[in-house]
């Protein structure tokens, strides 16, 4: 087979080591500037394949370039004999779906993540299945060149009824592409109502066109069920409850009462509707309020709960925000600990990939010291297996879920 000769991009001295460890992200500042390849007169366009080489010209990896993004290149192979073409995307999609069946296939009416970006060697693509529909999120502008190939193959191998494609505004800005709020990719099939699916014994719905990310949050699926096992008969406060995840499962599995707090009126409405549909509305109440303000108010009122769940949105989007994020986690957890009597249960989460597990646990050490409480970790968990971790990309180890007893 003949191989096309690709343009080369060279990394600065000493910058090759992440790529030898198979990290897929090549930021612009790691590259030697090459005026004839980028800029107005450059001939490299978004989605073009390039070879990444070190200072001596040794091959490091092959990827797609995006001159509009600070994340200038995403690497998709570290084998110089592998071409980036339609067949590569098809085989990577097939591999990802097969990977999900290693520990048992999810039922047709359930939900699961089918493709998780870097962890499935397709950096910039996230695909979630909700029953017979797919939520597809592109986070890499360079992949848009291959959009039709990817979507056609996804539909072919899953037999889905509809695919909803999203590009959020922040991604669009950083990647130099147009945002998409929810494009229906299968012609002639309308999604006029939310998609119904089953999870943890609950009947749930997801608004694939208007919801966050690709719809709901599937990474916490198993954590919802495990945490609920600690909450039987307990009075529970579910902070940043979104559409009810932890609290709904806890109520279904025997918590005596659950109060959910979220700043989004849309999320609260969806959570209340799910509570009614699943027959637990009598044990659930919801408040639309800022999580920090709500926790402080409840503390000032002298309220106590048997258990507090904290599942906030991502606090650190970049490495520059890690210190600020840890301060926010410290404040949130300190306020929560104040609401727990001795022996109370704290379920605390972080979905910030830039905040490491050790940094998160050290934050909890600080909370215990400041609040003069002992915090004993019962379970130190990550995401469900359909959100795997690529060891070469530590950022894919993003979700921490700690179940602890506060003494």
Image: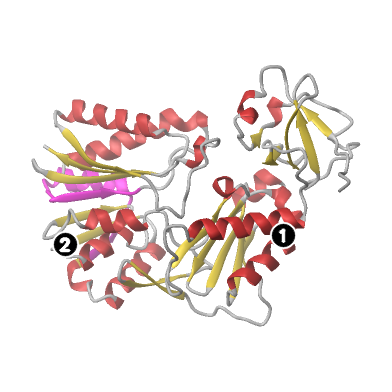
Specify whether 268 is left or right of 377: right
Q: Bin the neighbour count of mark 1 within 10 Å (Cα to Cα): few under 14, some 14-19, many 20 and up.
A: few
Q: Residue at (63%, 66%) from the top-left corner?
A: 154
Q: Residue at (74%, 26%) from the top-left corner?
A: 31
Work out which residue is located at the far left of the displayed protein and give it: 342
Specify whether 321 is left or right of 405: right
Q: Quadrant of residue 266?
A: bottom left
Residue at which label 1 appears: 147
Q: Earlier in the sequence, mark 2 or mark 1?
A: 1
Q: Residue at (30%, 57%) from the top-left corner?
A: 224
Q: Residue at (34%, 33%) from the top-left corner?
A: 360
**Front position in the image: 184 or 361:** 361
> Please, is residue 29 above or below residue 45 in the view?
above
Highlighted magenta segment, given as a residue range: 285-311
> Please, is residue 240 above or below residue 355 in the view?
below
Circle 2 — which element? loop
Residue at which label 2 appears: 255
Circle 1 — which element? helix
Location of the C terminus by quadrant is: top left
> Please, is residue 376 above or below residue 130 in the view?
above
Q: Bin the neighbour count of mark 2 within 10 Å (Cα to Cα): few under 14, some 14-19, many 20 and up.
A: many
């Amino acid at each position: 087979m003949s191989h096309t000769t690709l343009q080369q991009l060279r990394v600065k001295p000493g910058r090759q080591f992440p790529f030898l460890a198979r990290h897929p992200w090549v930021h612009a500042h790691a590259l030697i500037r090459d005026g004839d390849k980028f800029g107005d007169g450059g001939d490299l366009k978004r989605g073009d394949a390039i070879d990444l080489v070190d200072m001596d010209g040794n091959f490091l990896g092959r990827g797609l370039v995006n001159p509009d993004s600070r994340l200038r290149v995403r690497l998709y192979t570290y084998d110089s004999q592998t071409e980036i073409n339609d067949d590569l995307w098809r085989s990577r999609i097939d591999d990802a779906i097969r990977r999900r069946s290693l520990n048992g296939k999810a039922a047709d009416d359930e939900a699961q993540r089918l493709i998780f970006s870097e962890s499935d060697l397709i950096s910039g693509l996230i695909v979630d299945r909700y029953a017979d529909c797919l939520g597809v999120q592109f986070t890499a502008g360079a992949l848009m060149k291959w959009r039709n190939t990817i979507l056609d193959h996804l539909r072919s191998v899953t037999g889905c009824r509809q695919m909803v494609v999203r590009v959020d505004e922040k991604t669009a800005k950083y990647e130099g592409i147009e945002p998409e709020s929810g494009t229906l990719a299968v012609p002639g099939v309308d999604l006029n109502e939310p998609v119904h699916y089953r999870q943890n014994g609950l009947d749930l719905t997801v608004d694939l066109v208007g919801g966050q990310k690709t719809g709901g949050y599937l990474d916490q699926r198993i954590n919802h069920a495990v945490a609920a096992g600690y909450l039987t008969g307990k009075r529970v406060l579910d902070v940043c409850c979104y559409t009810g995840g932890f609290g709904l499962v806890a109520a279904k599995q025997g918590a005596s009462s659950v109060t959910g707090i979220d700043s989004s009126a849309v999320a609260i409405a969806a959570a209340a509707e799910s509570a009614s549909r699943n027959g637990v509305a009598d044990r659930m109440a919801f408040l639309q309020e800022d999580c920090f303000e709500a926790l402080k108010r409840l503390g000032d009122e002298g309220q106590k709960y048997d258990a507090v769940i904290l599942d906030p949105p991502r606090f650190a989007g970049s490495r520059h925000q890690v210190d600020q994020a840890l301060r926010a986690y410290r404040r949130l957890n300190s306020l929560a600990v104040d609401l727990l009597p001795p022996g109370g249960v704290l379920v605390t989460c972080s979905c910030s990939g830039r905040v490491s597990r050790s940094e998160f646990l050290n934050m909890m050490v600080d909370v215990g010291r400041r609040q003069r409480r002992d915090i004993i970790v019962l379970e130190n968990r990550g995401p469900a297996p359909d959100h795997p971790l690529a060891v070469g990309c530590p950022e894919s180890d993003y979700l921490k879920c700690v179940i602890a007893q506060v003494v």
